[in-house]
Amino acid sequence: MKGYTGVLADGQAVHYVDRKRWLWMLSVIYPLQPFIAIGLHAKTGVEAWFVLPFIFNYLFAPILDWIIGEDSNNPPEEVVMQLDQDPYYRRLTYAVVPLHYISLIAAVWYAATQPLGWWAFILLAAFSGLVAGLAINTGHELGHKNSKLEKQLAKVVLAVPAYGHFTIEHNRGHHKYVATNKDPASARMGENIYQFALREIPGAFLGAWAIEKERLANRGKGAWHADNLILQSYALTLLLSLGLLIAFGWIVIPFLLIHNAFAYWQLTSANYVEHYGLLRKRGDDGKLERCEPYHSWNSNHIFSNLVLFHLERHSDHHSHPLRRYQSLRHFENLPQLPNGYFGMYMLAYMPWLWFKVMDKRLMELPHVAGDLDNVNICPRAHPSIFLKWGRDKMSEPTYTDLPGL
């Protein structure tokens, strides 16, 4: 297996081997999951097979993360440059782009040409959408890089879930304001995922449009100019959708509506767990503190990281956004999730259980130390949170913050 050699400060050589090198291919083949359900249905005619991908991702995947466990191994800093420059890893992100198109087209073809019951049709469209949420993850990895090819590929893959505004808002909005109340993609303590979605999904689009409009205005161009990066990706979405509509008929419309909604939901689920309750404070000069690793929830669970291009090492990603997935590091004493993302999604979908598990974990973080002043709190939930976690301050909550008052 290929290794990388560097030199330590004391002159000694250090050798590193990425033992997960070939396992990263799981991130490439994971979007092909709809083919499993399609193949089983084609062979047996049993529509219940379309439930299988949901069972695997939301039951078996968390169990696999629990059984296989975590990996806190880091590549030495002395070899990170070599690791980043190894073309094998970036070729995997290139290879998965066309597979997202293949997965969508195959699912649409099967739904449009086979006599599926309405619930099987919905299940196929929904899970294809969740897979398209992985296309946003691919666009995330590609969109952070400086090469023209990768930036173009990010626009291409984001056309699949119709989320062409992602790179603009994520790179220039989310990374700037992460863990503050100005960021629509940072969940607040006491805010459940359904409330968060109503704020995050429109907020991300509006933020991206404002950023791109300003960029174009600085170049003397209007918002609807052909150089609008958001519109370029959406133009690809339109071409893809029209092609599917012409090929398979009007049934494509409800399929794509379901598909895109679930793709958005997949991203919302990830955003919700990544920064829940974490807060960057302002100094005496009014400036935000630098984004540190403890401003993101981290997970070292092996299986889900292998199928998500290491997305769950989110703390290092925010500290070093240009660093490629294979080089992301673990840090000690970080906010740690108790399971991988798939397990955390299921927890988030049950708000009472999420709050029970995560609020306690949040308040026990070393940099929070039980102080609500160190937490990003949902204004609507402030009174109830204060009553549970802030009694030691001996001041009354603001009851006008209660919903409906």
Image: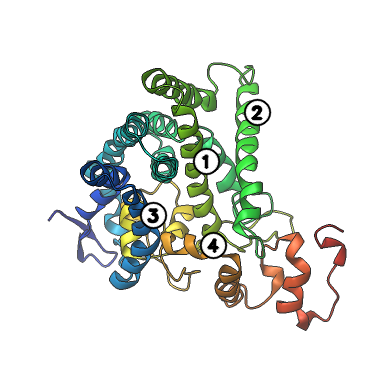
Determine whether 347 is above or below 194 in the image: below
Residue toward you, 396 or 201: 201
Give the Cα separation between the discs numbered 3 and 4.
Answer: 16 Å
Q: Residue at x 37, y 52 (%)?
A: 51
Label 1 Cα crowd, 10 Å radius (few <14 / some 14-19 / many 20+): some
Determine whether 255 is above or below 19 in the image: above
Q: Earlier in the sequence, mark 4 or mark 2?
A: 2
Image position, residue 210 (x, y; %): 66, 32
Image position, residue 135 (x, y; %): 40, 40
Give the Cα separation between the discs numbered 1 and 2.
Answer: 28 Å
Label 4 SS: helix
**Contact, CB < 8 Å: mark 3 with mark 2?**
no
- On the picture, is 167 further left or further right than 75? right
**Contact, CB < 8 Å: mark 1 with mark 2?**
no
Circle 4 residue: 348
Between disc 1 and disc 3, the foreground one is 3
Q: What quarter of the picture does the N terminus occupy?
A: bottom left
Label 2 Cα crowd, 10 Å radius (few <14 / some 14-19 / many 20+): some
Amino acid beneath label 3: Phe
Circle 3 residue: 54
Q: Earlier in the sequence, mark 1 or mark 2?
A: 2
Circle 1 residue: 261
Q: Quadrant of residue 42?
A: top left
Q: Earlier in the sequence, mark 1 or mark 3?
A: 3
Would residue 144 be seen by someone viewing this image from the given angle? no
